[in-house]
Amino acid sequence: MAFTVPEPMIEPVVRGLLGAIDVDGGATEEQILVLAAIVHQLWGRDDLDLATLGGLTPGELARSLDDAIPRRRFHELLVTLESCRHPLTDAQVSSVETYAAALGVHERDLAIYRTLINEGTQKAAADFERFFDDMLVPRSERSLQRKPIVTDEPEPELVAQLETFADLPEGSLGQAFLSFYERNGLELPGTRASNVNHMYVGHDMIHVLCGIEPTGPGEIGLGAFQMAMDDNPVNTFAFLSPLALHESGLSSIDNIEVVDSTLLRPGAIELMATSMARGAKCTGDFTTVDHFAIAHEPIDEIRHRFGVVPPEHPDDGFHFWQH
């Protein structure tokens, strides 16, 4: 189900978010910029002035949102804004918990940020990595989900399987996949030992089909696209993961460098919002298909089948849109 909020509920959702981030003297500049991008670019509500709108209390919001879906989407956006507060404070974590309780939302991502405040970064990182490991199989390439995850040695058979894409027609998904790796100077999954090799295959197929490149902002944008396409638990965690890696600086996975405040980089917030908007326009979720089975098909036809629209600015340095 696409990441949308019914039109009558958009304003209370926005006002609830404003109320939830109004702690410690007010929302941060980054939080307001991220919220504004979502309101204006994802929902097209230029009429909502965040400076004058005013917030809702948890009780007021709960009375305004009487459906589970907009409640869940409010919570997902609130966790996004929570990760954009640097440094994260006890008041912000407490506010998120209060709003979640009022809406009857109890997600495990709350545990990560509660641990960050109460027990420090190291323990929170351990929580995140445990959740990440739980999602390894569901986020892996579909045809590889039945195979055991290899952690201590390379997987030459996987490499050889991917290399066969070189024999596929020009313009095919398989050819585009190999070009993605060559263009970005990446080694094919399976070249070295890693517990995320199977996940990388599926994850990078999504990169290729979305046309979003693997930069820090691009990873957050890709997760936003994926969650907006269908905010099921796997796709939602696919958005939470890059926020933890590239925005909160909570943890490092595989050989990814720990950074924070990625959304403050030029163009990053707009990329996240426009990626959400593109994902919400999709007519189906292509993350769970067997990409090996369709690797021979023209990438344009696959995109058309799932309603993947081109980025508005394909030459902005965040995208590679192959025709």
Image (spheres, rainbow, N blue to C red):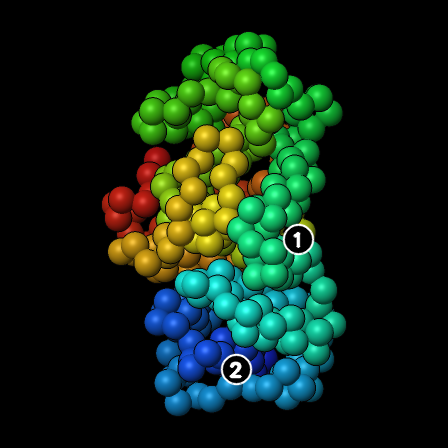
How far is disc 1 from disc 2 in space, using C-alphas?
26 Å
- x, y (%) of residue 105? 71, 68
Provide the secondary structure element on which disc 2 rests: helix
Local crowd at mark 2 within 10 Å, few (<14), some, or many (≥20)? many
Q: Residue at x 46, y 20 (%)?
A: 188
| Foreground pick, 202 / 2 | 202
Mark 1 = which residue?
232
Q: Tell me the quarter of the picture where residue 272 sits.
A: bottom left
**Mark 1–mark 2 contact, CB under 8 Å?**
no
Q: Residue at x 49, y 15 (%)?
A: 191
Q: Is residue 142 left or right of residue 13?
A: right
| Foreground pick, 248 / 207 | 248
Q: Is residue 59 above or below residue 132?
A: below
**What's the amino acid at mark 2?**
Gly
- x, y (%) of residue 144? 66, 25
**What's the amino acid at mark 1?**
Asn
Marker count (numbered): 2
Mark 2 = which residue?
19
Provide the secondary structure element on which disc 1 rests: loop
Q: Residue at x 48, y 46 (%)?
A: 245
Res. 40 in view: no
